[in-house]
Amino acid sequence: MTRTVELAGFPHQRLNPLTGRWILVSPQRTQRPWLGKVEERPLEATLAFDPSCYLCPGNTRAGDARNPQYSSTFVFDNDYPALLPDTPHREIDESGLIVGRSEQGLCRVICFSPRHDRTIPRLSAQELRQVVDVWVEQYQKLGSMFFVNHVLLFENRGVIMGASNPHPHCQVWANATVPDEIQTEQNSLLQYRARIGSCLLCDYLRLELQLAERIVCENEGFVVVVPYWAVWPFETLLLSRRHFGAMDQLTSHERDLLGDILKRLTTRYDNLFETAFPYSMGFHQMPTDRKSHPEWHFHAHYYPPLLRSATVQKFMVGYEMLATPQRDITAESAADCLRGLSEVHYLQSRRA
Ligand SMILES: [Zn+2]
Ligand SMILES: [Zn+2]
Ligand SMILES: [Zn+2]
């Protein structure tokens, strides 16, 4: 047992060392233990092909675009991109008060599978490897474009996360400016390295493995924890055991291990409330700005909005919107919950 226990009974603040921001934890508001799922929800769509889906093979998308009859992964430029590669350079600065600049970039969509119903937890090891391979390929390809200094691969899953389509897919946005969240974490990683002489996330991972209070699952290459400073009820942080900056440095074996850990984690998520668990997830890795980044440690964040069941959602409103994020269920109980779940997907065990 550790000193974290000393705070367990009272409202307390936890620091996120990656962002320097604090979160408020109120464990006294969850006096009773977690009760498991409390209500039924509609079953997941189980269509293998949906004629009205713009991501299924052979279907038409926006305008005249038609998807090929693809049989594994499929990558295309977003039909409604948030960033454009041919944006001209413009800057405004009115007395340092009204300051703006144009931003160059591009957005792509990556379909994980031709199957409309094959989400990450339901892909085979071989299919997951194809997904990891295409991620690495896109990170490298887009990152090597002359104006691209950062590449973000992220997945929005579920209607409440704003995903417009349940077909398993993710997005990749590549742009000229290193985004705020990445820059903030990079500053923290650099400062820690300058102060302590080692990697913040290597040291944090070592501490978590030693304490064994917040670990959800692990394999030879990766560990998933509910971070001490988690904001979302079932937020997780996926860390590589080895120190490296980006997914193009994954060994072939680690690519398989990444697929494996993603499947284990998302299966647990789906099993938690027996639903297609919604989340936003993304990989944080070193910028592609042609500078050396020994400080970067490859990782992924999962931010899921569900609280107590498939239908009860956490909202960031009130105090959280105006002051600082707050949570009731502690990171330790959330980790206990997730760790205890089966690695067999509930749809599969129902069929058995
Ligand atoms: Zn589809
Ligand atoms: Zn590290
Ligand atoms: Zn991060």
Image (tube, rainbow, N blue to C red):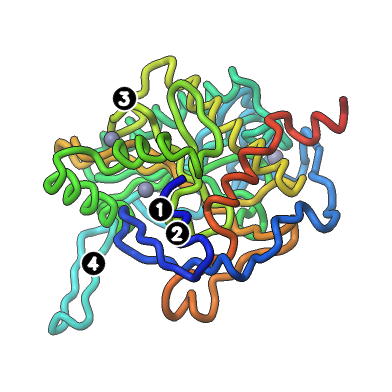
Q: Are marks 1 and 4 in contact (CB under 8 Å)?
A: no
Amino acid on which disc 3 is placed: Gln
Q: CA distance from mark 1 to mark 2?
A: 5 Å
- Quadrant housing the C terminus: top right
Residue shown at the point (65%, 60%) measured from the top left: 307
Q: Are marks 3 and 4 in contact (CB under 8 Å)?
A: no
Residue shown at the point (22%, 81%) measured from the top left: 98
Question: Whole-percent x and y of residue 326?
Answer: 50, 69
Callout 4: 10 Å neighbours few (<14), some, many (20+)?
Answer: few
Asked which secondary structure carries label 4, the reply is strand
Question: Which mark sits nearer the N-terminus, 3 or 1?
Answer: 1
Nearer the observer: mark 1 or 4; the answer is 1
Q: Which residue is mark 3?
A: 249
Q: Which label number is shown at residue 101?
A: 4
Amino acid on which disc 4 is placed: Arg
Residue shown at the point (24%, 58%) measured from the top left: 88
Q: Which residue is mark 2?
A: 6
Asked which secondary structure carries label 3, the reply is helix
Asked which secondary structure carries label 1, the reply is helix
Q: CA distance from mark 3 to mark 1?
A: 36 Å
Q: Which residue is mark 1?
A: 3
Q: Are marks 1 and 2 in contact (CB under 8 Å)?
A: yes
Callout 2: 10 Å neighbours few (<14), some, many (20+)?
Answer: few
